[in-house]
Image (spheres, rainbow, N blue to C red):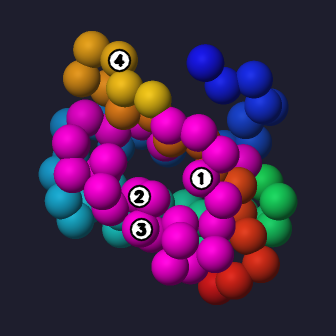
């Protein structure tokens, strides 16, 4: 599904809005520009929230997928913060 090397992993399964995005914000703050992050989530609201988070803060949503109720997002940290 994701062919890129993953630098960081964040598992937010079992958490609900706004916790996954709050944890994402905290994790990405500690990463270097250009590093990748694989986020897994079970909250369907992440389908809306994570792409908006990336657009608003200048990060690249490389890909996203859903399989059996698990949402996966590959994100590359951008310059903005």
Q: Which badge, 4 or 2, is on the more N-terminal residue? A: 2
Element carrying mark 2 = helix
Residue, disc 3: 52
Magenta highlight on residue 60: yes
CA neighbours of label 2 inside 10 A, class few (<14), some (14 to 19), many (20+): many
Q: How many marks?
A: 4
Which stretch appears magenta? 36-64
* Residue appearing at x 36%, y 33% in the figure: 71
Contact, mark 2 vs mark 3 (Cβ under 8 Å): yes
Q: Give residue 2's position: percent from left, percent from top.
A: 66, 25
* Residue appearing at x 45%, y 69% in the figure: 53
Cα separation, mark 4 vs mark 1, equals 18 Å
Q: Which badge, 4 or 3, is on the more N-terminal residue? A: 3
Residue, disc 4: 67
Residue, disc 2: 50
Contact, mark 4 vs mark 3 (Cβ under 8 Å): no
Is 35 or 56 nearer to us in this picture?
Answer: 56
Q: Give residue 1's position: percent from left, percent from top.
A: 61, 18
Cα separation, mark 3 vs mark 1, equals 10 Å
In the picture shown, does residue 9 fall above or below 31? Answer: above
Element carrying mark 4 = strand
Q: Is residue 5 left or right of residue 45?
A: right
Magenta highlight on residue 43: yes
Is 38 or 45 nearer to us in this picture?
Answer: 45
């Amino acid at each position: 599904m994701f062919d890129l090397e993953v630098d960081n992993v964040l598992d937010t399964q079992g958490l609900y809005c706004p916790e996954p995005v709050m944890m994402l914000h905290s994790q990405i703050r500690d990463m270097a520009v250009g590093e990748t992050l694989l986020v897994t989530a079970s909250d369907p609201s992440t389908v809306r929230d994570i792409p908006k988070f990336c657009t608003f803060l200048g990060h690249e949503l490389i890909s996203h997928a859903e399989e059996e109720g698990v949402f996966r997002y590959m994100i590359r940290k951008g310059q903005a913060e």
